[in-house]
Image (cartoon, rainbow, N blue to C red):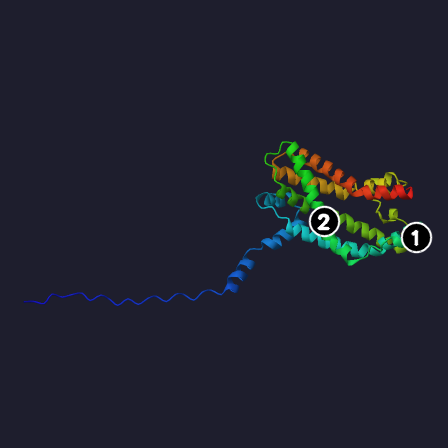
Amino acid sequence: MGKVATEQPALAFPSLPKPPQPVFCRVSYCALSSGEPMDAVLDVFNVLHEPTAVFTRLRERPRTLAPWLVVSAFAIVLTLLTRPYQTAAMDALRATLPPEQAARMGGGNSLAGLLGVPLGTLIGLAIGAGLLWIGSALTGATGARYKTLMSVLAYSSITYVMFGAVTLAVLMVRGVGAVGSFEDLRAPIGLDVLMPNAGLFLGTVLNAINPFSVWGVWLCGTGIAMTQGISRTSGIVVTAVSYLVCLLLLSTPLLLLGMALKR
């Protein structure tokens, strides 16, 4: 009888797992391949010359952290550089007060006040975005998104930094010795040039209506129109009204100070 050939099974060896890719390699590759954080920072400046492209990206993915950090950093620098002029104005104010009242006034140069600049910027953006949300809803925006509006406002706030830089340049040209009151801290580039003798409150409000604020209102209104689906005219009107409301709220302490000093 012939032997039946039996097929011997092949020996199977378990496959060795591939060595894992180092984590730092994957992280570094992702960080280099996606420049999203840097793009968000650059858009703070790109919005000045290509707002349509920037607001299109914000409509798809709103960003608030990057513009808030950039604007806050500039605000801190401007606060530091304008501190000598603020101090001169405060000293001039103390000279007009009784000694007891002047002694109770703080210097205003503490580190806590400087660190409060980013917090104040964030609060201002939050309040402004709330007013924009209300205005957008009233103009017929379907599903107005607060986060997107805050992102648009944050990027448009770069014009405020430009206004602060111009004001600083004017103060540096004048010198600290030319500051004899809080009115001298204003750069005459707003509507206050039409009323040079305006008081502290009215002069500040008029000074805040200047080419840079108009530019910022236009930018923000354009961003609202693109991200919320309303007309550009409606977006600009909503932004202008919100800006005036915030301006009056921020200037209220100056109104009280002017009444106390009869200015």
Element under label 1? Answer: helix
Q: Are marks 1 and 2 in contact (CB under 8 Å)?
A: no
x, y percentage for residue 130? 67, 40
Provide the residue designation for mark 2.
121
Note whether residue 190 is visible: no
The residue at 73%/42% (across/down) is: 215
Report the side of 37 relative to 14 (left or right): right
Asked whether residue 258 appears in the rendered view, the answer is yes
Dot 2 amino acid type: Thr
**Quarter of image, res 33:** bottom right
Q: Distance between the residues labelled 1 and 2?
A: 33 Å
Q: Nearer the viewer, residue 18 or 134?
A: 134
Whole-percent x and y of residue 144? 61, 37
Label 2: how many residues lie within 10 Å, few (<14), some (14-19) or many (20+)? some
Locate residue 1 relative to residue 81 in the image: left or right: left
Residue 103 in which image quadrant: bottom right
Circle 1 is placed at which residue position?
100
Closer to the camera in the image, 252 or 65: 252
Is the residue 127 above or below the residue 175 in the image? above
Residue extending furthest left?
1
